[in-house]
């Protein structure tokens, strides 16, 4: 697994080990943290390699030595706002890591990849987004790099007999997060409990999926979708406004903070102010999230604050 010490990757490590699988996790710790997987240090079926996937000779040698049955590729620059000033960040950390993973798998004759894609590939597509017919015009470098990664998984499937499971994430929340709206709000209020500055007008409206539900979806789709190339939107039907998240964070922290909204309908260049998924395809496969968007947000806040254990 790439990105195995990251927010989502560490939860996926837990789930795979819980199913009796052996896991070799690779992470360069640019966003991941040793703390996320420290509890797995004595687990005999878990191995952690600190490694940069962009160091191709070293990474490909590891893949050849391990020869995994399936590669879960989660490594990426998942902080969309940070790459606006440096588009090379996503070229390397989000796209080149994907290409290097595919190339190393080909050399090692590994043929199964589960890929963490994103709603960002759709850009500002209007209305509920159906994965079978929505336009694909990203507005962020991150979305462009994820879309390029999907394209290369498709070409490797057609040229070299790979099987791919492409999962298009919405906004994912939960404990071990390294960035994102909840993480940012909590840290801003810790620094200044009297007021909370919000990027944008607070009317941004998106579906939020709890990390445990996402991991369950990943494993379910991997086990149930049997095409050579499988691609799915994953999420919830409900959505949550940024203003609602601000209110929930303030409430859970027991504060009376004043909320200062910014101007405009988005928080940064490349942000998509609202989107909504059509989930008919994953529903037909048999999966549905356990929590609504608001429930996911509330639980994530409580767990990031240590008010509720995982």
Image (cartoon, helix red, strand yellow):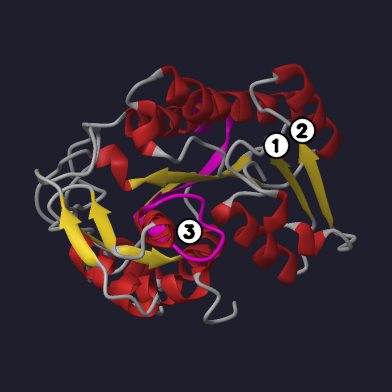
Check whether the beta carbons of the residues at disc 1 and disc 3 lie within 8 A of each other: no
- What's the CA distance linking mark 2 and mark 1? 9 Å
**Region rendered in magenta:** 157-180
Name which residue lies at 56% across and 54% down. 7
Element marked by disc 1:
loop
Q: Mark 2 vs mark 1: give the one in front.
A: 2
Q: Quadrant of residue 257?
A: bottom left
Q: Quadrant of residue 27?
A: top right
**Does residue 7 show up?**
yes
Q: Which residue is mark 3?
A: 225
Classify mark 1: residues with Cα within 10 Å, few (<14), some (14-19) or many (20+).
many
Q: Mark 2 vs mark 3: give the one in front.
A: 2
Q: Work out which quarter of the rendered image holds the C terminus and state it.
A: bottom right
Along the viewing direction, whichever of 65 and 251 lies nearer the viewer: 251
Q: Which residue is mark 1?
A: 110
Residue 127, percent from left and from top: 10, 53
**Does residue 237 show up?**
no
Check whether the beta carbons of the residues at disc 2 and disc 1 lie within 8 A of each other: yes
Element marked by disc 3:
loop
Classify mark 2: residues with Cα within 10 Å, few (<14), some (14-19) or many (20+).
many
Residue 105, percent from left and from top: 68, 31
Mark 2 and mark 3 lie on one chain; the one further toward the N terminus is 2
Along the viewing direction, whichever of 301 and 174 lies nearer the viewer: 301
As drawn, the label of residue 63 is 2
**In the image, is 37 to the left or to the right of 226?**
right
Residue 5, percent from left and from top: 66, 49
Mark 2 and mark 1 lie on one chain; the one further toward the N terminus is 2
Instruction: Look at the image and say whether residue 161 sits in the magenta stretch.
Output: yes
């Amino acid at each position: 697994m790439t990105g195995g010490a990251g927010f989502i990757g560490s939860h996926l490590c837990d789930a795979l080990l819980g199913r009796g699988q052996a896991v070799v996790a690779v992470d360069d710790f640019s966003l991941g943290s040793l703390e996320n997987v420290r509890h797995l240090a004595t687990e005999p079926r878990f191995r952690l390699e600190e490694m940069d996937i962009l160091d191709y000779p070293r990474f490909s040698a590891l893949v050849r030595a391990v020869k995994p049955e399936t590669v879960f590729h989660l490594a990426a620059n998942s902080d969309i706002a940070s790459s606006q000033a440096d588009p090379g960040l996503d070229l390397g950390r989000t796209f080149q890591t994907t290409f290097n993973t595919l190339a190393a798998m080909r050399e090692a004759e590994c043929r199964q990849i589960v890929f963490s894609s994103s709603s960002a590939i759709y850009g500002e597509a209007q209305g509920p987004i159906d994965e079978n017919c929505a336009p694909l015009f990203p507005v962020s470098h991150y979305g462009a790099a994820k879309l390029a990664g999907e394209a290369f998984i498709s070409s490797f499937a057609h040229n070299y007999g790979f099987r791919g499971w492409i999962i298009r994430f919405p906004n994912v929340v939960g404990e071990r997060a390294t960035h994102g709206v909840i993480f940012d709000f909590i840290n801003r209020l810790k620094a200044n409990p009297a007021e909370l500055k919000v990027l944008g007008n607070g009317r941004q409206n998106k579906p939020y999926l709890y990390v445990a539900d996402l991991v369950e979806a990943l494993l379910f789709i991997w086990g149930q979708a049997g095409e050579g190339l499988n691609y799915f939107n994953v999420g919830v039907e409900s959505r949550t406004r940024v203003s609602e998240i601000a209110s929930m964070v303030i409430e859970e922290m027991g504060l009376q903070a004043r909320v200062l909204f910014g101007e405009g309908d988005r928080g940064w260049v490349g942000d998509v102010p609202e989107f909504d998924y059509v989930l008919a395809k994953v529903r037909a496969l048999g999966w549905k999230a356990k929590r609504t968007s608001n429930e996911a947000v509330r639980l994530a806040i409580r767990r990031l604050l240590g008010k509720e254990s995982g």
